[in-house]
Amino acid sequence: MNLDNCSAVITGASAGIGREFARQLASRAKLLVLVARRRDRLEQLRTELVARNPALLVNIRQTDLSNLEQTMQLAALLTNEPIDFLINNAGVGDHGSFATADPIHVNEQVQVNALALTALTRALLPRMIAQKRGAILNVSSSAGFLPLPRSDPCRDTQLRDYRDRALPRSGPYRIRRGRESTGASTKAAEQSRACCG
């Protein structure tokens, strides 16, 4: 998909890779919807992006994606926006044994990493199909692929695999679907995009 004049939603936009996605898209997009919990950081980022591109419209949606009600409100709001690029970047990690993990944190992790991703994708996909234009990028950590000390690879893998299965196949429609892992596998992803589009 050509990103010129795109309208993008970026979750987890207040820091890290989400913030960098916003910076990279600022010169090409016409609309960026930045989603994160920390409003002050989102406002700082909006100021920076508009200074680079005064024609860019930047909307801030302060949302805690670990909260189901806030996630569903955001999904309903985005249904009416002409979004053609969704970057599901927000994510929550953990370490240690699943058997002793805090159940509240486990629920928050599933809510952010799987349910929010699914709700936002479901909200935006019909319009992308109708527009015959769209792309969805799910970002995950390469840490989920590694056997790290004090981590439960089964839990990491299950969430990562759920994220892959949660995004429906768009069938005959031209909606691009992808997953970008951060860290060690980024170079391989770049090489793959270079040869496969």
Image (cartoon, rainbow, N blue to C red):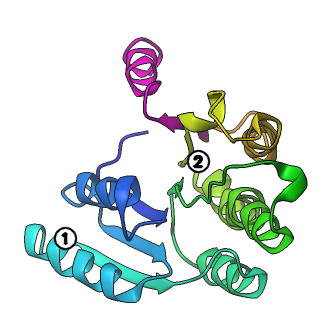
Residue 10 seen in this snapshot: yes
Magenta span of residues: 176-197
Circle 2 residue = 132
Does residue 129 appear left or right of residue 99 in this picture? Answer: left
| Residue 1, image x, y percentages | 44, 39
Does residue 124 appear left or right of residue 23 in this picture? Answer: right
Residue appearing at x 69%, y 65% in the figure: 112
| Residue 161, image x, y percentages | 78, 37
Residue appearing at x 63%, y 81% in the figure: 74
Quarter assignment of residue 158: top right
Residue appearing at x 84%, y 51% in the figure: 98
Earlier-in-chain disc, 1 versus 2: 1
- The answer to whether residue 181 is above or below residue 32 is above
Quarter assignment of residue 114: bottom right
- The answer to whether residue 146 is above or below residue 130 is above
Extreme residue in the right direction: 99
- The answer to whether residue 120 is above or below residue 137 is below
Query: What label does residue 49 carry, if any?
Result: 1
| Residue 152, image x, y percentages | 77, 40
Identify the secondary structure beneath mark 1: helix
Task: Give the Cα distance between marks 1 and 2.
Answer: 28 Å
Q: Specify the amino acid type for callout 2.
A: Lys
